[in-house]
Image (spheres, helix red, strand yellow):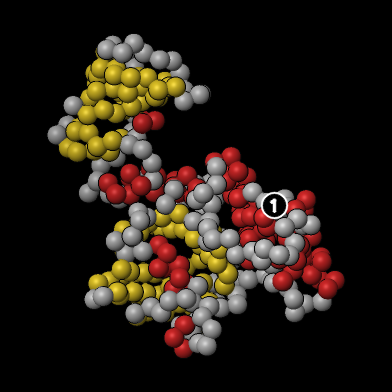
Amino acid sequence: MIEARKVNFEYSDVFSLKNINLKVEKGTILGIIGQSGSGKTTLLKMLAGLKDPSSGAIYLNKVPLEPPSKKLIAGHKQIKMVTQQNTLFPNISIAENIAYELRYFEKKYQSQRVNKLSKDLNISHLLTKFPRELSGGEIQRVMLAKAIADEPLVLLLDEPFANLDPIIKKKVLINLQSVLRKESIACIFVTHDIQDAFGLVDELFILKNGRMVQKGSSEVIYNSPKNKYVALLTGDGFMINIAGKESFVRAENIEIDDEGEYEATVTNNIFKGAFYEIIIDFQAISIYCLSKKPFVIGQTLRFKLTSIIHFD
């Protein structure tokens, strides 16, 4: 479907993206994560046809796409992009906003398509409203409907849900995944929050300083990160010394056990609803483990490690 082959982007004699190769098939979702400045948005803009690669090429269905420098209007009609920015027309209804993308189709099809997408994205009750009457989560769902209205092959998402509260975001992501599967759209989802990607994407692509440092399923990358950067980017954890070797341990793999091999002092308890985070002092650093009950501050406890990650 959409593919980047040996793509580089050079800015002021410095490579901000180096030798990027990726491929996303229809109906699948690729998540791209990395710290700020890692090149996520630049990569997305090249895939969208809004920036020229310094070298390499972007392909859609195995056909190389013309870069924006060779086109009168940048972008490609079969590739749509959604960002945090509200691009809805303020003075027409939501139904009219979505139908605008279908303005060259027959009215009957426009109506059918708008009704189908509004049902799939749970926005049927919003069709007669205006953008100013909508919440942030509602606006993002409408923008998704607008982006996929004319059945693009590829949908690019540049952190469109970053400002949504967690409950609304979860609902939007569930809707999104279902619709993308139904529509057989290839999707590339850029985020700095790994929790947005877990459960949504089929594959993760980790960027650091413009280079791909690891790719694979969420489960593989979370449980077998290649280095400290990937480990910390994909979830909480701690670097500790195990048998003279620096190792990485996630909080859920620190199990309180009276017969455990290691000993630490409790310094705090943080209530998290279904569990407590027990802050402990170990090897002169603060780490935490999970427990159904709080512990006395100053108490000594023992624990074992159920999984340890060693980096090459």
Q: Position of residue 91 (x, y in %)?
A: 71, 64
Which quadrant: the N terminus? bottom right
Q: Residue at point 83% right, 73% down?
A: 107
Q: Position of residue 243 (x, y in %)?
A: 17, 32
Residue 216 visible to the viewer: no
- Is 299 rendered above or below residue 48? above
In which quarter of the view is residue 180 placed? bottom right
Q: Residue at point 43% right, 58% down?
A: 32
Q: Residue at point 26% right, 75% down?
A: 12
Q: How many marks?
A: 1
Dot 1: element = helix
Q: Position of residue 155 (x, y in %)?
A: 57, 65
- Is 75 rendered above or below residue 72? above
Mark 1 Cα shell of 10 Å, populated few (<14), some (14-19), many (≥20): few
Query: What amino acid is found at the position of numbered circle 1 in the picture?
Result: Glu
Where is mark 1, residue-wise?
A: 133
Q: Is residue 267 left or right of residue 68?
A: left
Residue 122 visible to the viewer: yes
- Is 286 rendered above or below residue 24? above
Q: Nearer the viewer, residue 130 or 210?
A: 130
Q: Nearer the viewer, residue 276 or 206?
A: 276
Q: Is residue 53 left or right of residue 85?
A: left
Q: Is residue 45 left or right of residue 127?
A: left
Task: Determine the residue located farthest toward the right in the rendered image.
Answer: 108
Q: Is residue 210 left or right of residue 202?
A: left
- Is 269 rendered above or below residue 286? above
Q: Position of residue 162 (x, y in %)?
A: 50, 50
Q: Residue at point 67% right, 63% down?
A: 90
